Image: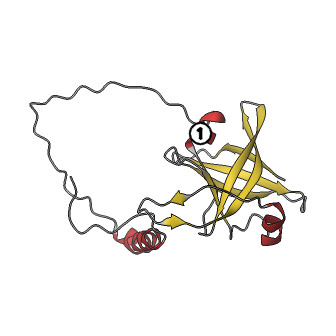
């Protein structure tokens, strides 16, 4: 069993810092966990450095889940593993047993919508938007990407396309 501690990172992004501790090692290891309110399942990559492959093989259980990327590509699942997360807020701690699907892609831990809501990491609220139908919609100009960020952005987009997370689009969409 893996035990983890999670706390708010302080970033504006939906990233949280997690500490994992396995029953093999007494050392705590930090990692970043993504919160994805559009995800149905919690994911973790098979090649994640938080624990050894031997540990995963020992604790891996079969999974009947089928996962697909945004592009519709099938994501290979090795199995599932249970991880305990400890959420600490305002000096109060609570532990949650979360089942992660172990996927073949090099994915950092990702918490699903249900896990985020169950742990109180996100809250949803309803809003009403008033739309004036007499106003004609406009398309905004593309924003220029700073030169220093262009190459890293191109690499990241290529990686996301390769993993089937996004697809290249040559025409504008409605």
Among all residues in the image, which is located at the extreme front? 64
Q: Quadrant of residue 153?
A: bottom left
| Lateral position of residue 55 relative to residue 158, left or right | right
Name the residue located 41 percent from the left edge and 69 percent from the top edge: 157
Label 1 sits on a secondary structure element that is helix
Q: Say few, some or many: other residues with alpha carbon within 10 Å of mark 1 (under 14 / 14 to 19 / 20 or more).
A: some
| Lateral position of residue 20 relative to residue 101, left or right | right
| Lateral position of residue 137 relative to residue 124, left or right | left
Q: How many marks?
A: 1
Name the residue located 72 percent from the left edge and 30 percent from the top edge: 90
Q: Quadrant of residue 71?
A: bottom left
Foreground pick, 1 / 68: 68
Foreground pick, 77 / 123: 77
Q: Quadrant of residue 24?
A: bottom right
Name the residue located 40 percent from the left edge and 75 percent from the top edge: 151
Coloring basis for residues: secondary structure
Q: Position of residue 38 (x, y in %)?
A: 49, 46
Q: Position of residue 129 (x, y in %)?
A: 29, 27
Q: Position of residue 160 (x, y in %)?
A: 45, 68
Q: Position of residue 41 (x, y in %)?
A: 59, 50
Name the residue beneath numbered marker 1: 114
> Is residue 39 depicted above or below 170 in this figure?
above
């Amino acid at each position: 069993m893996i035990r983890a501690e999670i706390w708010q990172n302080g970033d504006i992004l939906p990233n949280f810092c997690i500490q994992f501790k396995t029953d093999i090692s007494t050392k705590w290891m930090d990692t970043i966990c993504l919160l994805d309110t559009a995800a149905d399942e919690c994911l973790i990559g098979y090649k994640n450095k938080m624990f050894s492959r031997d540990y995963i093989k020992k604790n891996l259980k079969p999974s009947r889940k089928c996962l697909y990327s945004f592009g519709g590509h099938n994501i290979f699942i090795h199995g599932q593993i249970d991880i305990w997360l400890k959420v600490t807020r305002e000096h109060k701690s609570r532990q949650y047993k979360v089942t992660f699907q172990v996927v073949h892609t090099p994915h950092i831990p990702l918490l699903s919508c249900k896990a985020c809501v169950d742990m109180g990491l996100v809250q949803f609220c309803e809003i009403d938007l008033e739309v004036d139908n007499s106003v004609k919609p406009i398309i905004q100009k593309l924003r220029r990407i700073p030169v220093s960020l262009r190459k890293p952005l191109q690499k990241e987009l290529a990686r996301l396309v390769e993993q089937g997370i996004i697809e290249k689009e040559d025409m504008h969409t409605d």
